[in-house]
Image (spheres, rainbow, N blue to C red):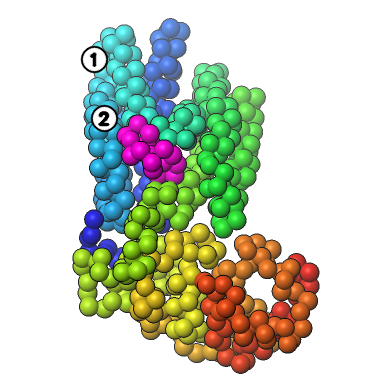
Amino acid sequence: MNYPFWDVGIGYGWLMGGIAILHVFISHFAIGGGLYLVLAEISARRLNDAFRLEFLKRLSRFFVLASVVLGALTGVGIWFVIGLLNPAATEVLIHHFVWGWATEWTFFIVEIAAAIIYFYGWDRMSPRNHIIVGWIYFAAAWLSLAVINGIVTFMLTPGDWLRTGDFWDGIFNPTYWSSLALRTGICIMLAGLYALMVASVLRADKAKASLIRYNAVWAVVGLVIMIPTYSWYFSSIPEGIRQTAAEAMPTVMARISEGWWLGVILAGLVVLFGLIIPRWYYSAVGVAAMLLGLLWFGEYEWMRESIRKPYVIYGYMYGHALEVADRDHLKTDGLLPQLAYRTGDDGADLFRRACRSCHTMTGYKALKPRFDGTDEAFIAAIVRGVGVLRGNMPPFLGTEAESELIAAHLFEQTDHRPLSEIDGLTGVELGRKVYDIRCGSCHEFGGYNDKAASLVGLDVEDYNDLLDMAGELADEMPDFTGSDEERAALIEYLTSLTEGGTR
């Protein structure tokens, strides 16, 4: 699918993440809320608890607004954004899962209708019929999740679909069941946290304490479900994906351990103030717990989206919307002939097609700071070798001439002064900067593709020899094209290093 490129100032990751995380949060919240409302209503009616029934009536107003209004608006927003950011990937999801989407939309319509009837039926329907509508609302919402979960997990772990192209292989992929169990736990947790936050502002008495304990049980049950399913989900991700992410994207993988700690803190907060001393569950505690839940969920979604790099559909389509199957012929025939819409500036068009889905010049994942003070030859070499850089990026699928066009486009927008002048550095500090710019994208001391063992302890002559033959050491490695001042500073920096690449 070829569209004119949508070039906006904000980074695509922030734009998509802001809308998608909000939508997913609302949808999970609405699903858990549906289950909470119907079970809490059943309990309250059995106990003839007028206080709790009145609380549920007020609570249902927000759940309806969240699912019907905010959920629908952000859902449409996601379709609008993905259609502009990555129309090719959107086309794949629509074509291969068209009946899945149709099924999900049917469930969503039932969910919306049931939510509206449920809210307006408190004083107009018999308790039995009202509870039945509540069950319909929850069932439709959860079934909608069950379908969407298959498509979302498919993008990370398509599994046998890559070989068969079968609808069911794509839906019931390797992470489907673990993700569905985890998301069900998240739904229950979020419902409990929101109900706790609303109850926290009520006047303190025995009825409030009882309600706080009831709501805290919901949050705790959700967390208890999430603990084993969180581990199950990550163990379901193929080892190769996890290993690649651990090596190339350590910051992303660190979110896994952070997620455990956030879960522990959240559980401690809910157990202490919700179960043990519910009279102290004030509004500040309720808001703090809700924010922790949102933070945990946001980190999980960000990690899940990031771990599949360099693909948007793992093993099938790269993040810049070029298919893996086209890799060989694109390297031979070039990318320009594939562009249906061209502006006349081939370098700019190639940059938008090959790089702009992840990078801006001065904003999100900015390239200008990485290339200020360098030269066209170095930039072109980096473009050609982008697939081995830190960050797990897609390979460059184009010809050498096209990499030079991109390099020229980027070079025009960089600062052409020497690094020493740009940053006001000399000696070892200048050398550190030179290493970071010209070497650190591939070789990080103590991190990605660390070469400290082979670099530290050499003499000046050895370092000069290495720099002379740099472009011959690997196909993706650029020649050293820095100035004599930068070469001297880089060698001074390297000779100052001790074992492990530290000073």
Which of the 4 image quadrants contains residue 232? Answer: top right
Q: In this view, does 431 lie to the left or right of 329?
A: right
Q: If you read the primary sequence from the N terminus, does the residue marked by circle 1 or circle 2 appear first?
A: 2
- Location of residue 89 with respect to 260 vertically, above or below: below
Q: Position of residue 97 (x, y in %)?
A: 28, 38
Q: Give the range drawn in magenta.
A: 148-170
Q: Position of residue 429 (x, y in %)?
A: 67, 81
The residue lying toward the viewer, choosing from 392 and 231, is 392
- What secondary structure is found at the residue carrying circle 1? loop
- Location of residue 153 with respect to 188 vertically, above or below: below
Which of the 4 image quadrants contains residue 22? Answer: top left
Q: Is residue 249 left or right of residue 464?
A: left
Q: Is residue 265 left or right of residue 183?
A: right
Q: Distance between the residues labelled 1 and 2?
A: 31 Å
| Pointer 1 local density, CA inside 10 Å: few below 14, some 14–19, many at least 20 | few
Q: Residue at x 53, y 20 (%)?
A: 214
* The N terminus sits in image quarter: bottom left
- Location of residue 85 with respect to 113 vertically, above or below: below
User: Label for residue 103?
Assistant: 2
Q: Where is residue 451 in the image (x, y as percent from the top left)?
A: 68, 68
Visible residue check, residue 431 = no
* The C terminus sits in image quarter: bottom right
Residue type at the position of mark 2: Thr
Visible residue check, residue 232 = yes
